[in-house]
Image: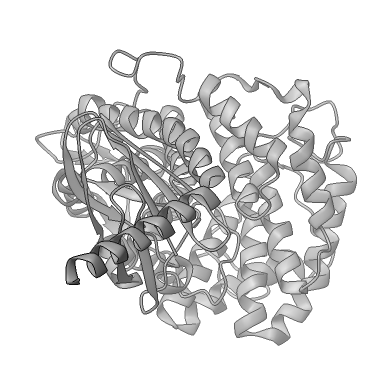
Amino acid sequence: MKFTKNFSLIMLICCILSTTYAKDEESFETARKSAKIASYSLSKTHRWLHEVALKRIDPATGLYIADGKWNYRDTAADCYPFLTWAAFILDSEALNGPVRSILHAEQKLCNHVDRIPVSYDYKNKKKIDLSYDEMIFQASEYVKDGLIAIIEVTGKDEWFERMKGIEEDIWKHARYDSPYGKIPSKNVEVNGEQIQALVRLYTMTGQKKFLEWAERLADYYLLAGNFVPTRLRDHGCEIIGGLGLLLAVESQHNPKKAKIYQPLIKKMLDEILKRGTNEDGIMFDTLDKPDSRLSDGWGYNYVTYLCYDMVAARPVYRNRIVRTLANLKKSKYKNYRWEGDSIDGYADSIEGGLYIMNRYPVPEALAWADSEMAANVVYSDKPLATAPLWGTMKLQANGVRTTLIHALMHTRGLIARPWRKDLTLGASETKDGLAIVMRATENWKGRLVFDIPRHRKYMGFKHDWPRMNTMPEWFTVEPEKKYVVKNITNGTQKNYTGKQLHKGLPVELKAGEETLLLIK
């Protein structure tokens, strides 16, 4: 009788799980398609990490000589962060070994004015003299493009302390007078970068000096009442993104200041739409110059429009953004040569687009991103084992960056550790959870790491404010919440907390067999 009851219970569970699979079959099929895309990209990046990038670390100095030199405008800002991302996602031992050691080496060798670094001649083992403006420019580039990207995925680790130290000393040595106090630069790109960094430092530390410095820069540009940047591509995007993120944070932490900034920023945004976009909503390189190239930074700029709508609590720009995304289906945007044959133009355009698609998953735009990544960044028509790999100079590194963002969109932020090149992983949301597909050619045992609301846990944001230089969040688990993990393949289920899932769900794969998981 006991055997009969147990058998009946097992059959009931299997029946429930089978019914569950049927209900979510469409999500599993989407996850299978995503697994094909994500796994090729991740495995190719794994090859790049081990066959190319790690070999570019100079054994004598420990610096990453990605493009034949170590400086802070290119190598530290654009190459090092995505080496770090690749190691974070694909090889924890590399992250905590040689990749982390680069951070230690550059501080030891390159700090020049307090904690502000300068370029280093690794062949002759000496620092390179820079002018004040160039030193501030390079340090700001490292903070905004390099260290921010890293701390967005690692939180308050050593990279955060490095960022905080550089920023404190940049402002300690600020030398330019403004009506609102000393500022470190008159360069609009640098000051846009500074706002983005300072806002994050304020929410991560609670120290008001960082917000006050950001406000000093915003006042410098906005309070005259008619500020509109003329450059809408690389470098000009920084001030637009900085002002948007500052407005977002001010709306929570200093509403009086937000009320001052909001109409001024709206005027700026409206002028850009009026004078800086084509009929499809894609921005030109330069304001009032429709004959200039289309900007590969169009998506970066629209991030501020998303911030504005969240602050306004109404869809002021939503319809315009959605139409722009839908227009990407037009044939003229297929293989569009944003910056000639450079991978960087494709990578930047797609990255900015993905930030927007994270909020508005317009099907036409998602299909465009998949197609453009395959053809112009990942080159996924080549056999994985012999496919040519990216280089390590900054334009190629930006390709690696966008490859990882796009891949994690298709895993919904899940990371399989340890990664192996025969592994496949894809995921897709269901009505009330997540469908996951995994497979490996050989037996595999490891952990499936779930993302958390990093915007809140790491960055200190009350909302997931749209922003540049981040790894977007897709499916996240709350640490204290309980989740049911159903293994559709073997008919088992178990409860886990979000904290446990973030630490890693134990998974074993049998060679050649597909494993289906459902998270509720």
Q: Quadrant of residue 224?
A: bottom right
Q: Relative to residue 113, is residue 73 drawn left or right?
A: right
Q: Position of residue 385 (x, y in %)?
A: 28, 17
Q: Relative to residue 421, is residue 456 drawn left or right?
A: right
Q: Nearer the viewer, residue 195 or 403?
A: 403
Q: Residue at x 88, y 44 (%)?
A: 275
Q: Nearer the viewer, residue 378 or 344?
A: 378
> What scheme was used to colour the molecule?
one colour
Q: Nearer the viewer, residue 371 or 8?
A: 8
Q: Residue furthest front?
A: 1
Asked if 216 appears above or below 402 in the picture, the reply is below
Whether residue 71 can be seen here: no
Asked if 210 appears above or below 320 in the picture, the reply is below
Q: Relative to residue 127, is residue 327 drawn left or right?
A: right
Quarter placement of the C terminus: bottom left
Q: Position of residue 15 (x, y in %)?
A: 41, 56
Q: Position of residue 380 (x, y in %)?
A: 45, 20
Q: Residue at x 40, y 31 (%)?
A: 41
Quarter placement of the N terminus: bottom left
Q: Relative to residue 307, is residue 96 drawn left or right?
A: left
Q: Residue at x 70, y 82 (%)?
A: 257
Q: Residue furthest left?
A: 60
Asked if 458 appears above or below 343 in the picture, the reply is below
Q: Residue at x 69, y 40 (%)?
A: 363
Whether residue 395 can be seen here: yes
Image mark count:
0
Asked if 178 appears above or below 109 in the picture, the reply is below
Q: Position of residue 148 (x, y in %)?
A: 42, 57
